Amino acid sequence: MVEHVSALIRDDRSRAPRVDVRVAVDPAVPRFAFDRDQVIQVLWNVALNGVEAMNGRGRLSLEVARQNGDVALAISDTGPGISSENLPRVFEPFYSGKPNGSGLGLTIAERIVGAHGGRIEIDSGPGRGTRVTLLFPLEAA
């Protein structure tokens, strides 16, 4: 799934002409239940936000690891970052930091991840890029 989204970004030369896409998947991460199409939509939306923030130039990293009792899917970019004033608003419907953004991408992403029992964490700041981590709980065996 992560490889699929990374290939879509690599192949989208109109939006990502100079984006170095890196993928790291911890093989020890166990399988977990999720809606593949919905999670791909979330990964695509978040990755595309990163590409657009970098104006098609920079590094986009997609990582899969285990974090405590969760599976963490992290998408990081080397864009300009999000100011501390705007960070609390990123999940608000119709709020967008992009000139032509709908302001629905992260709102929808949060709902999809929440419907899977998970949450989204964002670490960002001006001049240091953004890291969006999608956390999905592992079901008790």
Image: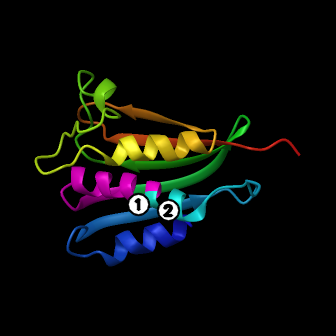
User: In the figure, is residue 123 to the left or right of 95?
Assistant: right
Question: x, y (%) of residue 7?
Answer: 43, 74
User: In the figure, is residue 60 to the left or right of 2?
Assistant: left
Residue ranking furthest to the left: 99
Q: Is residue 54 magenta?
A: yes
Above or below, 40 relative to 42:
below
Distance from disc 1 to disc 2, alpha carbons, whole Å, reads: 6 Å
Quarter of the image for the N terminus: give it: bottom right
Label 1: how many Cα within 10 Å (few below 14, some 14–19, many 20+)? many
Q: Secondary structure at mark 2?
A: helix
Nearer-the-camera pick, 100 or 26: 100
| Tag 1–tag 2 contact (CB < 8 Å) | yes
| Magenta: main secondary structure | helix
Question: x, y (%) of residue 53?
Answer: 23, 49
Residue shown at 55% from the left, 39% from the top:
114
What segment carries the magenta color? 42-59
| Three-letter code for the amino acid on which mark 2 is drawn | Ile
Question: x, y (%) of residue 15?
Answer: 22, 68
| Three-letter code for the amino acid on which mark 1 is drawn | Trp
Residue shown at 67% from the left, 56% from the top:
26
Q: How is the image coloured?
A: rainbow
Q: Which residue is mark 2?
A: 40
Q: Is residue 76 magenta?
A: no
Q: Which residue is mark 1?
A: 44
Above or below, 73 relative to 89:
below
Residue shown at 30% from the left, 45% from the top:
104
Question: x, y (%) of residue 61?
Answer: 44, 55
Choose top left, top right, bottom left or bottom right for residue 87: top left
Residue ranking furthest to the right: 141
Label 2: how many Cα within 10 Å (few below 14, some 14–19, many 20+)? some
Q: Secondary structure at mark 1?
A: helix
Count of all numbered marks drawn on residues in the image: 2
